[in-house]
Amino acid sequence: MTALARHPYKLPVLAGVLLAFGYFTLGLVVPSLIALVPLCAWIDANLDRPWRFLRNGGFVFGMAWNLLILHWMRAMLQSSFLAVFAYLGLAAIFAAGSAAVVLVVAWTRKRTGWSFAVLLPAAWLSLEWVLAHGDLRMTAQHLGQSAATYPFLVQFADLVGPYGVGLALLLSNAFLYGAWSADTRSRRRRAAAAWIALIGVVLAYDAWAWTHPPRPTGTLKVGLVQPNVPLLEKMDAATDAAQQRQLFDLTRRAAALHADVILWPETAWPKPFYHWPDRPQTYALGEVQQLARELGVTLVVGAEYGIVRNDRPRAYYNAVFVVHPDGQLDDTWSAKVYLVPFVEAVPFKLLLGPILSGRGGWMHWLAGGFSPGPRIGPLPVAGTAMGVSVCYEELYFDLQRRLRNAGARIQAVITNDAWFGTTFFQTYQANTDRLRAIENRTSFVRVANSGISAFIDPLGRDLAWTDLNVEDVRVAELPLAGPPTVYDRIGDLPAWLAVAGLAAASIAAWRRSG
């Protein structure tokens, strides 16, 4: 065992592979509870090694983990060869973060002797918090998100949010390692007892919450349409008329099922919508408004929205509009706030903007072109408030919490996930809506062009779940939310506690290094 633990990469690779399996939607929860035990053993066995050795092992761990969970990016090769560089680049960036975590944990462990139960969450969650901010923010790989496949097991997310779920998984790994590696029977028993207590408390709350669903304040009958338009066809202006006919036919089918509101996917309206602010009559979606009047139903419409000044487009938005049953286009609209770096917006614009903005050819994939939405707030839909996010914004728990705190009583995600083909990321991303529903105790509607579309109740249970790459229409009556949850009120407190714990461990280690 000593020889294995002293090997430069075997245990880090094992930990990375086990952790990756916790992200795949295979019905396995065990990997996330034990995956980091080999990494803890490797760190403890090599505290006497140079920092470069630990850095390299941490990087290998990160590459093993991220090359597996990011393999879905192969599906984007159908759009651009740049997907290869994005895949390898993201894996390397995230692996560098893993190396930093290993270095910090090893350094503080060696200097302070503190438990992994303190050091591992402090370093890991602090890194996740950093990655959730800035122009390149990304939360898809956050550990807590991996548990979204199992709604019963994460009912406690309404108290502590996704960072709290990640904390529980990290503590499980730390306690199990302590129970296995402790040098005395009493320490092993204490670590085992801590693990049993952790699992017992979590399961007890989960069971209580599962059998005591939140009391709704009303219901709303919601319809969704899944047109399943292929990517290349979606981008071909010659198919606009056919896309419109399909949307209208599917919408009529949903209206025949007595939906109060019908949602379309991201940018489902095939023609860009241009508005001249000095010409109020141009704020119109005439054909859509006529359809709403014909059916007597509220429509929530995804469209590309351009604001024109001096006869030149000044801003483009990946926007969402509400058309009321009387055909009125509501003045309140929203748009995607967290834009995909490079694809939708140039990050670090002062530095990269002059180089990339407005470029053509293959470079147009790096040139952005969209502006972030000017507001974060719910939309007035069928007598209630609906928080609508766009595309991969379902991964950003802070955005959903802000919408909930702004008054949303039901929430929706409109997206076009055809980019991801039939990879596991389709299911993984859709499952995160289950976690969002639990965190905020709101019903969620997911409307995807090619699937997966879904209705999810406040317990995270899917009431309907469409297949990939099929045309579909669904209608369901969903409960409206009551008061905000504890997580809505306290926010990402576990992340802040992790940052504070990392600061305390670093100060203690620094003092003892002298």
Image: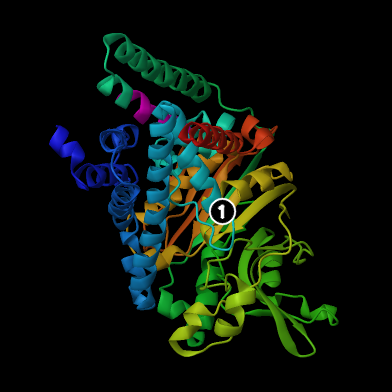
Residue range of the region highlighted in magenta in the rendering:
167-176
Locate residue 390: give its quadrant: bottom right
The verdict on residue 175 being magenta is yes
Residue 105 drawn at (x, y percent): 41, 38
56 lies above or below 345: above
Dot 1: what SS? strand
- State the residue in front, 92 or 340: 92
Residue 412, position in %: x, y? 59, 51
Q: Residue at x 30, y 52 (%)?
A: 56
Which residue is located at x 57 percent, y 74 percent?
346
Would you name the residue on which mark 1 appears?
A: 223
Quadrant of the rendered image containing residue 45:
top left
Please name the predominant secondary structure of the magenta segment in the image: helix
Q: Quadrant of the N terminus?
A: top left
* For residue 422, above or below residue 238: above
Q: Position of residue 165 (x, y in %)?
A: 48, 34
Q: Residues within 10 Å of mark 1 (few under 14, many from 20)?
A: many
How many circles with numbers are drawn on the protein?
1
Q: In percent of the image, x 32 and y 11: which residue is there?
A: 189
| 82 to the left or right of 490 | left
Is residue 465 in view? no
Residue furthest front as drawn: 514
Task: State yes or no: residue 455 in magenta.
Answer: no
* Residue found at the far top of this picture: 186
Q: Nearer the viewer, residue 232 or 123?
A: 123
Q: Where is residue 184 in the image (x, y as percent from the top left)?
A: 27, 12
Looking at the picture, which amino acid does disc 1 mark? Gly
Residue 510, visible in the rendered structure: yes
Dividing the picture into quadrants, the one containing residue 324 is bottom right
Q: Residue at x 33, y 48 (%)?
A: 58
